[in-house]
Each structure stands twice: as structure tokens, then as C-alpha cells.
């Protein structure tokens, strides 16, 4: 994974402490018993430095308070970043939220990747580096016991410790986490998947520990180990995760539940659900593609940028949109496709299951060069954008089928680890209203009207999904490895000019020698918000 200098001047800041009208309101008969306690952060675009101490929602005091709180996510285009503190006194960190793993880890300030050098002038100054000697509450749990490798090749090794972790106003005492002494990435990860997916589970299941989501439940901060995720649209700088609750104002009913599918070993390790069909509706409202009765085990993973589908599905889609495969930029399409009215429909769980419509625009993501310009198709062609759907390989291969952020932005998703269920509904973009309902201990997900059980699948993949596809989008000197083709789907928009026939001139896609930073730089800039860095506006 490549990292690039910060170059933007648009800043985000946290607003000062406030209460959002209507947040956390329960039904009248519930309010008589208790009033809710909801914590959140709100980001706004302003030309001022980020203030990490502001933005906490004020507490709503009562005799008994509902256990649900939220924290805002920063959309850094390639990752969703949440700000936390670790230790006493608190040390600040930006970490990537990830439903596809279970460990919380951050880089050690002693790690080589954190040292500021000519080639790495930032070190960990943007993301944070943990200094154990500065924390009086840090305790060593397992020296050298933390080791994890992701599908994209990034790897970390180090120690397990216990220390205080704060998310917003919520403090988790003696939380076990990894401190990376050797790492190929400086951005830490907050995994909120099943504890059975922790790094230690691969060597000794007896060492499995309560991870972040379980600790919130065990320490009585939420009633149930559950949360909901609202990523919002890619143009927005923020989204939110609501621990212990559901925000019924953030989706269009119905909210339908699905059983999480077990792995080959008979246990729950990933958020795997059954994808029963996938269709593509073109700009003229005609169904241009239908993949029915596919019954695939797909992992919902907010730690992965793109969506990965088997060859038999992905290749038809890529041909339909005329995507061009480049050596360093990955799959590209004309940026004009972002205005297409075409959309995908993902159906889950068979008859009666949730159906999520994903606009074509969600898969079309801008690419930027280091000087802030956009790569273009040659000979007067239009700008080129990344296409966020690709092949995971043959269906028979033991590779994960992932629905990443390009899908998840269109879905409001509730993860219930106690009942082993996922609830999904069509998301509402850019809504300020809020109606938070607590997920009760031992109870059902509020707002769920039905549970789809028509399709069952088994997840055969074992391992951790890739965190990003950034490596394929960050190098200089882009070149095309595959033939270009005209779209066979009616997208209702003109393709890039300057192309000709099936052997499109886009084979020489122009990329300035200064290099493509793509979305990687946007991610690093976004992480800079923790200490006042700029966020690059890429759309």
C-alpha cells in the first residue's frame, strides 16, 4: 500500500458539543421508564483546522438511560475512519472501521513505519503511534503474540496489551488490543466482527478475548452486542455507526432480517449472508442482466472498498459497462457514467428477502494525480474513473466474495452478533433526522418486519479479506493490459470521446509522470483530520 503527501487545503472540523433534535427518541411508553443516552460526533466542512476535542453530543441525563451511542465515520473515499483514544493520559488515533475482522490494533511509535524519514516525512504523526511508556494503564498481555495478515498483503506483528480505549465519550476499561511493532501500514484497524475471527483464534481458541463490540456489552455500555452502519453517499464527508441501536430515520422500510451463515467449521466467523440474485436495470428501465438463483455466500465488509463477485457474474457486468483493465489503475470507465440512471439490484435470502438498489454512480469513483488533475482518455477524451466492481475469481476458487463499500453505501445494515442476524434496508442518503431505537438484550432488532430464511449457504473461505484495493490504483505510468470495448448496456450517457472501436485509444490512457495518487492520497488526507490535516474533496 502506497502513501502520499498531503496536498489539499479543504479542511473538516468537528462542531462544538450539541444535541441533535429528536435523536434517540423512544416511544412514549418507553420514555416514561427511561430517557435515552446517545453519543455522537458530527463533522462539517469548514475552512478551519480540525478540533478533536469538540463535537460530542451532550448526555441526556435520567435515572435509567438507553444504551445506544453513535460515532461518526469520516469518508476518506477508500476507508471509513473513526477517531479513538488509547491509554491514560489518552493518545489520539485514527483507525479504519472494519466489519471483516475482529482485532483492534494501532502502530507502535517505535515501529519502523512510524519513523519520520525523507521518504516517509509523516511517519505516524497523522494516524497516531502508541507510546506504552506514556500510558499508566497499559499492561502487557502477550509479548509477540499479535500477528495478522490481510488478503491485500498488508501484515502486522507485535504485542497484545490491555489499556483504556475511548470511542467518543464511552470508555472501555482494560480492552485487549494489538500494538504493531512491525507493520506494512500505519493506519490501524478497529475490527468489529465476531471474536472468533481474532488473530489469536487461528493459533489457540482458548486465547479468544472480548473485542470492542463484546466489551461494550460486557461493560454495560450497550444492551446487546449489536450495531448499525450508515455509510452515507460518497459525496458526503461523514457517515455513522450506532452501537447498540437502530436509527429508523436513516432507511426506507422494510427492514428485513437475514440469518448470518456459518463457516465450513460450523461456527460464526464472518458476516456472511446469502446473495440469491443480482440484476442490472439499464437507463431505459429494461433489465439488461439477470443472475437468478445464484445462492452465493457473500461477506459484508466495510473494510473493503470495492465489490468482488465471481467471474461468471463480474465478467458479464464488466463487458456490459465496457470497463477497461489498466495495469496500475485497475478497472476504469468514463466518469460520465456517474450520471447514469442505471442501477443494480442485490437480492438476499430468497423470496421475501431484502432487495437493495445500488445506483451505477456508486461504482464510479474519481482518480486524481498528485497535482490534483484527473487522468483522461487520450485524443481529447473525457476523464477516467475507477470502477468499483471486479472479479473475485472462479466460483469454485476458495476466494472471498465481498460486498464492500461500493455496495454498503446503499444499504442500511444492522449487525446483531447475539442473534447471529443481519438486517438490511434501502438507505436514505444525507438525512439529518434521527430516531434511535435501542436493541434490547435478548430481544429482536427494532423495526424488523420479517426474516428471510429461504436460502442457506455455507462460507468456505477462511482468512481475512483485503482492506483496500489501493495497491492497484496508486502507481505512475498507467498502461492497459486488456482490450477496450464499448458498453453493451444502455447507460444513457455518452462514453469518453477520443476512443475508436473495440481497440480503443484508451489503451494509452494518459497519466502524468508525477503519478496517480488515486484514492490512496484521499485516504491519508482524510486521516489527517485527527491532527488538523486537510481532506481532499475528490467528487
Image (cartoon, rainbow, N blue to C red):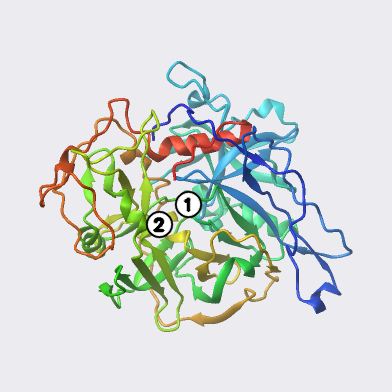
Residue 309 placed where, x, y %? 31, 60
Q: Nearer the viewer, residue 87 or 40?
A: 40
Pick whichever of labels 2 and 1 is earlier in the sequence. Answer: 1
Residue 324 in the image: above or below residue 537: below
Q: Is residue 322 left or right of residue 33?
A: left
- Specify whether 411 is left or right of 487: right
Residue 526 in the image: x percent, y percent? 53, 38
Quadrant holding the N terminus: top left
For label 2, count other residues whose C-alpha is less than 10 Å away and answer few (under 14), some (14-19) or many (20+): many
Measured as percent of width and height from the top left, residue 356 is found at 44, 70
Q: Secondary structure at mark 2?
A: helix
Q: Position of residue 454 (x, y in %)?
A: 42, 83
Real-space Cα distance between discs 2 and 1?
7 Å
**Helix, strand or loop at mark 1:** loop
- Residues under numbered marks 2 and 1 in contact, where contact means CB atoms less than 8 Å apart: yes
> Hey, which residue is sitting farthest right in the picture?
63
Q: Which residue is mark 1?
A: 234
Q: Residue 467: which numbered mark, if any?
A: none
> For this view, does 105 lie left or right of residue 154?
right
Please report the residue visible at 88 percent of the width from the left and 62 percent of the height from the top.
Answer: 62
Residue highlighted by disc 2? 362
Residue 351 or residue 50, whichever sits in front: 50
Please tell me whether residue 187 is drawn above or below residue 78 in the rendered image.
Answer: above
Quarter of the image with the C terminus in it: top left
Mark 1, other Cα within 10 Å: few <14 / some 14–19 / many ≥20: many
Residue 264 seen: no
Q: Residue furthest top?
A: 118
Inspect this view and state whether residue 368 appears: yes
Pick whichever, 241 or 54, lies toward us: 54
Corner quadrant of residue 473:
top left
Amino acid at each position: 500500500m502506497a502513501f502520499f503527501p498531503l496536498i489539499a487545503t479543504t479542511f473538516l472540523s468537528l462542531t462544538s458539543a450539541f444535541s441533535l433534535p429528536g435523536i434517540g427518541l423512544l416511544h412514549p411508553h418507553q420514555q416514561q421508564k427511561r430517557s435515552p443516552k446517545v453519543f455522537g460526533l458530527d463533522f462539517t466542512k469548514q475552512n478551519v483546522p480540525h478540533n478533536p476535542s469538540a463535537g460530542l453530543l451532550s448526555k441526556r441525563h435520567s435515572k435509567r438511560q438507553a444504551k445506544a451511542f453513535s460515532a461518526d465515520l469520516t469518508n476518506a473515499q477508500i476507508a471509513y475512519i473513526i477517531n479513538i483514544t488509547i491509554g491514560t493520559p489518552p493518545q489520539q488515533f485514527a483507525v479504519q472501521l472494519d466489519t471483516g475482522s475482529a482485532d483492534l490494533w494501532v502502530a507502535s511509535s517505535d515501529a519502523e513505519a512510524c519513523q519520520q524519514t525523507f521518504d516517509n516525512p509523516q511517519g505516524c504523526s497523522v494516524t497516531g503511534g502508541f507510546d506504552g511508556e506514556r500510558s499508566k494503564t497499559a499492561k502487557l498481555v502477550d509479548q509477540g503474540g499479535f500477528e495478522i495478515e490481510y488478503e491485500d498483503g498488508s501484515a502486522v506483528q507485535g504485542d497484545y496489551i490491555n489499556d483504556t480505549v475511548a470511542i467518543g465519550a464511552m470508555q472501555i476499561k482494560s480492552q485487549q488490543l494489538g500494538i504493531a511493532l512491525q507493520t506494512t501500514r500505519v493506519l490501524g484497524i478497529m475490527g468489529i466482527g465476531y471474536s472468533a475471527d481474532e488473530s489469536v483464534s487461528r493459533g489457540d481458541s482458548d486465547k479468544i478475548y472480548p473485542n470492542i463490540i463484546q466489551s461494550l456489552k460486557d461493560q454495560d455500555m450497550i444492551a446487546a452486542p449489536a450495531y448499525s452502519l450508515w455509510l452515507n453517499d460518497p459525496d458526503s464527508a461523514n457517515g455513522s455507526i450506532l452501537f447498540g441501536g437502530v436509527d429508523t430515520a436513516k432507511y426506507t422500510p422494510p427492514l428485513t432480517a437475514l440469518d448470518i451463515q456459518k463457516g465450513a467449521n460450523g461456527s460464526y466467523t464472518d458476516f456472511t449472508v446469502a446473495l440469491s440474485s443480482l440484476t442490472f436495470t439499464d437507463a431505459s428501465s429494461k433489465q439488461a442482466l439477470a443472475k437468478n438463483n445464484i445462492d452465493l455466500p457473500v461477506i459484508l465488509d466495510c473494510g473493503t472498498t470495492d465489490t468482488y463477485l465471481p467471474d461468471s457474474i463480474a465478467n458479464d457486468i464488466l463487458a456490459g459497462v465496457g470497463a477497461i483493465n489498466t495495469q496500475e489503475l485497475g478497472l476504469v470507465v468514463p466518469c460520465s457514467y456517474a450520471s447514469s440512471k442505471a442501477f443494480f439490484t442485490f437480492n438476499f435470502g430468497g423470496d421475501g428477502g431484502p432487495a437493495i438498489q445500488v445506483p451505477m454512480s456508486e461504482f464510479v469513483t474519481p482518480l486524481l494525480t498528485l497535482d490534483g488533475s484527473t487522468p483522461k482518455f487520450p485524443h481529447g477524451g473525457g476523464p477516467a474513473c475507477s470502477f468499483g466492481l471486479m472479479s473475485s475469481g472462479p466460483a469454485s476458487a476458495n476466494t472471498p466474495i465481498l460486498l464492500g463499500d461500493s455496495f454498503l453505501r446503499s444499504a442500511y445494515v444492522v449487525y446483531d452478533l447475539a442473534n447471529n442476524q443481519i438486517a438490511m434496508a434501502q438507505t436514505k442518503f444525507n438525512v439529518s433526522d434521527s430516531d434511535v431505537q435501542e436493541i434490547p438484550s435478548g430481544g429482536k432488532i427494532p423495526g424488523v418486519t420479517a426474516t428471510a430464511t429461504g436460502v442457506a449457504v455455507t462460507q468456505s473461505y477462511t482468512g481475512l479479506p483485503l482492506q483496500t484495493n489501493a495497491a492497484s490504483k496508486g502507481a505512475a505510468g498507467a498502461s492497459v493490459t486488456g482490450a477496450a470495448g464499448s458498453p453493451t448496456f444502455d447507460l444513457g450517457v455518452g462514453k469518453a470521446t477520443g476512443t475508436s472501436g473495440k481497440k480503443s485509444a484508451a489503451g494509452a490512457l494518459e497519466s502524468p509522470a508525477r503519478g496517480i495518487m488515486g484514492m490512496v492520497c484521499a485516504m491519508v488526507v482524510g486521516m489527517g483530520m485527527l491532527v488538523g490535516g486537510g481532506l481532499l474533496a475528490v467528487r
